[in-house]
Image: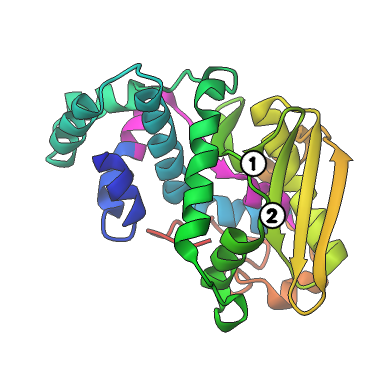
Amino acid sequence: MLIDRLYRDLARNIRFFERALALEKEAYGLTYVSSRAVAEAAVCPRAAAFRAAEEEVEVFARALRDRVRYAAMLGIVEGSYVDALTKRAARGDRQSAEALLRIGRDLGPGDISAILPRLREEFEAARRAAGKVVVTAARGAVREAAAYVKYAEVYPYAGMGHRYGNYVFYAVAGVGVDHVYLFRLARSREAGKRLALAEGDVAAAAFKKENIKLHIYVPGEAIYSFFEKASDPTPKYKALIEGECRPGRACASCRYREVCECVGDIPRRRHAGS
């Protein structure tokens, strides 16, 4: 579908999603926050709030792409109709953009259960297509993506939001029978586990699962496995929304240290890879 292609080249099509987000806020008053920003609230709510604002367009773009795509996969709408709406919305047609925002917005985890086998097949196909990926040769986000494709457990991977007030906390995870699954690259076992569990709490709430399964890949060491009960994520939601500064050792390496100083407005950047 066209919206999928637009999302895959997000940097080039960022204006389309910025306009769609502005319309979403006007019509529904919602703010979109990633599970990774929620995890960062465990370290410093202020830094988490900065990150949430910085990456909101990207998070919303994923959420919009997912729900429209799932609706088409479920047969709720025709792909050709979605493409026609997307083309008109990209040309500035407000009614088409509003119609696009309505597609799939009420879908919940139970609704998408029918397409989970197809989503699993997509991951398996991505793994086969990746072939002999050399994870250690990559760096940064590319390295994380390569490790994910090569080492993550096979699941149907899906995105889902957890509504809290006027916020949508969005998570992407593998969906199991009674658990969500996350694979994360980390520098240390315990730090990776702590942040991934916080993300997992968001995913578990979004997909209505009781447990979290984690694989934490520490390059040069091992892939560590954990299976934990999910916790209520709302205290971290509240901390992020309040955005209080929590000075500590992390401040020295915080990417927002030059604009933070525990005062000032949260900066909004056009796009940030996360």
Q: Position of residue 251 (x, y in %)?
A: 73, 72
- Above/below status of 208 relative to 86: above
- CA distance separating discs 2 and 1: 9 Å
Crowding near the residue tagged with mark 1, few <14, some 14–19, many ≥20 C-alpha atoms within 10 Å:
many
**Helix, strand or loop status at disc 1:** strand
Residue at which label 2 appears: 183
What's the residue type where badge 1 is placed?
Answer: Gly
Q: Which residues are magenta?
A: 21-44
When asked about the image quadrant of residue 77, the answer is top left
Q: Tell me the quarter of the image containing the N terminus.
A: top left
Q: Residue visible at 57% across and 22% down?
A: 113
Compare residues 41 and 121 and report the one nearer the observer. 121
- Above/below status of 264 relative to 53: below
Contact flag, marks 2 and 1 (Cβ < 8 Å): yes
Compare residues 43 and 12 and report the one nearer the observer. 12
Q: Position of residue 80 (x, y in %)?
A: 19, 28
